[in-house]
Amino acid sequence: MEKRSVGVVMNGVTGRMGYRQHLLRSILAIQEDGGLPAGDDTVIWPEPILVGRNAGKLAEIAARHGLRRWTTDLDEALAAPDAEIYFDAQVTSLREKTIRRAIDAGKHVYTEKPLAETVDKALELARLAREAGIGNGVVHDKIFLPGLRKLRRLIEGGFFGRILSVRGEFGYWVFEGDWQDAQRPSWNYRAEDGGGIILDMLCHWQYVLSYLVGPARSVQCVGATHIPERVDETGTPYPATADDAAYAIFELDDGVIAQVNSSWCVRVFRDELVEFQVDGTEGSAVAGLRRCRVQHRSMTPRPVWNPDVPATEDFRAGWAEVPDNAEFGNAFRTQWEHFLRHVVAPGDPAAPFPWDFLSGAKGVQLAESGLRSWREGRRVEIDELTL
């Protein structure tokens, strides 16, 4: 088979997400498996070109994985003759400017979310990408998770009947950084650096809800900064200026109500770090990252409220496990494979890529609407976003 090399400029791989999910478990994993079959006699071979601001960290990562190409000069990386894709996993506040440079250089662009800090800036990037005729995409990893794919399969099979509501719980305790190191970078808690859980997670919930049931038509959101001071990577205390929790209600099509809590200040008492419950007239399901369990209407127990006696019903025992019925790969890698095929064969009907900059802008729009709802203390309608 013919090997089709694709240079991928990867900016931000010194961060946890950029390194683990995108470089290690996606690009290098594809190489370890001999490349990505493109559907004909071609194998796509992604060739990473590492970019970042810290030369020492880049050199260490490159040496660890036997990579020869890294630089702190983005323009140098974009000018490489074989560089076809620019990928961005930097802090949010730096993303828009570097994506513009990649578009100007004629590169296809794939990026972590949020695409930009405001919906106007996100739409401008979408327009620039369309005018430049480049492939463009935003990470939508949650819809490639096994649990949500099983949930989608149930919806497509009509399991729920008429869907009534969606309930989501996401989060865990992120240590403050004093007596235990924080599991997330400090910029996440500084609004001036693009931090905040509303901007971070409502981008996810926009495409998750659209994928499962339909887009949000309105939002009521209350944010909070529960932990007012944290300690950064150098051991220096700093004021947390961004929200670390969000409590949101979304109205979807056909009267469906979705409630999603997102928090970095909650201790987990559930099976997975994120869970979604979908309730319908014919049945219900609870899906996490990997598992999905269901209860049909015919198997629904008949509890009676009586606080004076101990509960005897084992409610969890009445739920059945949904089988995999397929092999599920890493969610980030799965979407990378879609984008690589899209870039190599953009006109191929078998290689579409619907998770583009416009889709990413819709995520920013929902986050922006959530922030506005919190700021103004009211329900905010969400208009259809177009270019």
Image (tube, grey):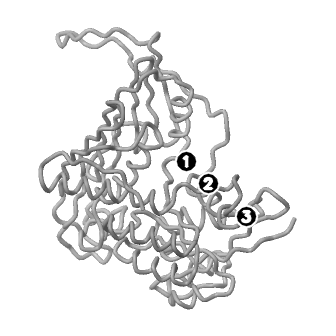
The residue shown at (73%, 69%) is 45
Question: As shown in the figure, which amino acid type bears the numbered disc 1?
Answer: Phe
Looking at the rendering, which quadrant does residue 193 occupy? bottom left
Q: Would you place residue 215 above or below residue 23 in this image?
A: above
Residue nearest the observer in this picture, 85 or 150: 85
Residue nearest the observer in this picture, 82 or 185: 82
Quadrant position of the C terminus in the picture:
bottom left
The residue shown at (50%, 72%) is 129
Disc 2 + disc 1, Cβ < 8 Å = yes
Residue 288: image location, x then y, percent: 46, 39
Residue tagged by mark 2? 334
Distance, label 2 to label 3, CA atoms, is 15 Å
Residue tagged by mark 1? 144
Distance, label 2 to label 1, CA atoms, is 7 Å
Mark 2 Cα within 10 Å, few/some/many (few <14, many 20+)?
A: some
SS at circle 2? helix
The residue shown at (45%, 80%) is 98
